[in-house]
Image (cartoon, rainbow, N blue to C red):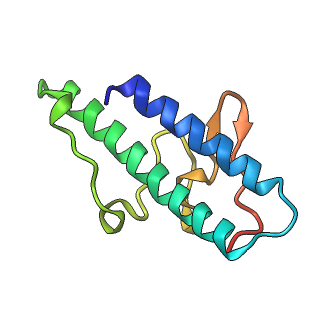
């Protein structure tokens, strides 16, 4: 997966998160999906950072690997602001849209 594909996946996940945020009420399934999206977003940002670091230091970016939830949990995104509990959605801006993490437990 190249950098552009990773960025497209991030945008898709953020768009899906916005659709969930706009729904009235959140079912247990919605909460599970929201959590899964946060984990996948953390993994995507982590993979992108790994690829960029490998490239910067003369290594093959294809050597970057998706790491597990526990490894990427709590890492900050290169584009987002601070994080806290909200995953890398907190403060994230893509295509002028701010991710909304309010109302999720």
Q: Quadrant of residue 33?
A: bottom right
Say left or right for 34 vs 10.
right
The picture places residue 48, in percent across and down from the top left corner, at: 35, 37
Q: Residue at x 35, y 47 (%)?
A: 46
Note whether 48 is above or below 66 in the view shown: above
Q: Residue furthest left?
A: 59
Q: Quadrant of residue 54?
A: top left
* 56 horizontally vs 43: left or right: left
Front position in the image: 30 or 65: 30
x and y percent of residue 26 in the render?
77, 69
Q: How many marks?
A: 0
Would residue 3 appear left or right of 102 to someone viewing this image? Answer: left
* Residue 63 percent across, percent down from the top left: 15, 36
Residue 71 lies, in percent from the top left, at 30, 63
Q: Quadrant of residue 50?
A: top left
Residue, x 37% and y 27% (percent of image)?
Answer: 3
Residue nearer the viewer, 39 or 51: 39
């Amino acid at each position: 997966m190249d950098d552009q594909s990773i960025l497209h996946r991030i945008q898709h996940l953020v768009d899906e998160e916005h659709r969930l945020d706009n729904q009235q009420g959140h079912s247990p399934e919605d909460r599970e999906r929201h959590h899964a999206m946060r984990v996948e977003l953390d993994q995507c940002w982590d993979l992108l950072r790994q690829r960029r670091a490998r490239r910067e230091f003369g290594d093959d970016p294809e050597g970057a690997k998706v790491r597990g939830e526990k490894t990427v949990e709590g890492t900050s995104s290169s584009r987002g602001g601070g994080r806290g509990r909200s995953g890398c959605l907190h403060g994230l801006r893509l295509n002028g849209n701010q991710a909304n993490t309010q109302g999720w437990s």
